[in-house]
Amino acid sequence: MSKEPIIGTLQEGSLHSSLKELYLDRNAKAEVLVDGYVVDIVKDGLLIEIQTSNFAQIKNKLLSLFANHPVRLVHPLSQKKWIVKQSLDGTEQLSRRLSPKKCGFEDIFDELVRIPSLISHPNFSLESILIEEEEIRRQDGLGSWRRRGWSIVDRRLVNVIDRRVYEKPSDFLHFIPDSLARPFTTSDLVEALGFSKQLAQRLTYCLRKMNVLKKVGKSGNAILHEVV
């Protein structure tokens, strides 16, 4: 492995860069070339890849790397987000407000649904980091219609709130409460946890792909699930 100090650093955002700093110490190196890929951090033999969105984009890279190396995928979840609007040139802050949306560890399934079976590989682990962040927006007319033309130009780490590492499929079973009747439907899970139906469906789908949850029948049209 040889260090490549330039490749991969010019295009990354502030959040990605700040998260890398969490892992950098005298035992870690950044931007290291491994098996033809530039890896964010190599620390004590562990390859650490930080992905702020879209796990599908990094799937092939992960598959190649964990064939021969232990790999950890790190993903931030915004439990507290400040929406910061700036002037077009970025020199003036126009407003700063707190977003009503709050993520928890369960929101990892919105991304994990793209690669649910990877956690079954012994060389792969996943770390979720709950963060406080600032989302920087500028009105350049190129942003989505929902944001009325305001574009998200950067994300900045304010604080790390909590962290959790998943090393094997059974680690995700903490999302299934002991008090839940067995077998259970997705609706039962929604009622017990207060999740949206879509998130509960993604959770059960991922756990089935990990082989820690299985279908055991139906209640009407609803699938019944049981822990393996």
Image (tube, rainbow, N blue to C red):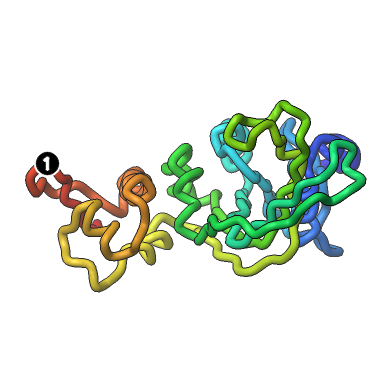
The quadrant of the rendering that contains the N terminus is top right
Position in image of residue 60 (x %, y %): 58, 31
SS assignment at label 1: loop
Q: Quadrant of residue 97?
A: bottom right
Q: Name the quadrant containing residue 22.
A: bottom right
Q: Quadrant of residue 152?
A: top right
Residue shown at the point (76%, 53%) measured from the top left = 95
Which residue is more in the foreground, 156 or 176? 156
Q: Residue furthest bottom?
A: 179
The amino acid on which the numbered mark 1 sits, given as a three-letter code, is Asn
| Residue ranking furthest to the top | 142
Identify the image quadrant of the C terminus: bottom left
- Residue 221 appears left or right of 145: left
Asked whether the viewer can see residue 37, the reply is yes
On the image, the x and y values in percent for residue 68 come to 61, 42
x 65%, y 45%: residue:
52
Q: Is residue 161 above or below residue 90?
A: below
Relative depth, front residue between 172 and 82: 82
The residue indicated by pointer 1 is 221
**Does residue 70 lie above or below 88 as drawn?**
below
Q: Residue at x 72, y 66 (%)?
A: 159
Q: How many marks?
A: 1
Image position of 227 (left or right of 199): left
Q: Residues within 10 Å of mark 1 (few under 14, many from 20)?
A: few
Side (left or right) of 119 relative to 188: right
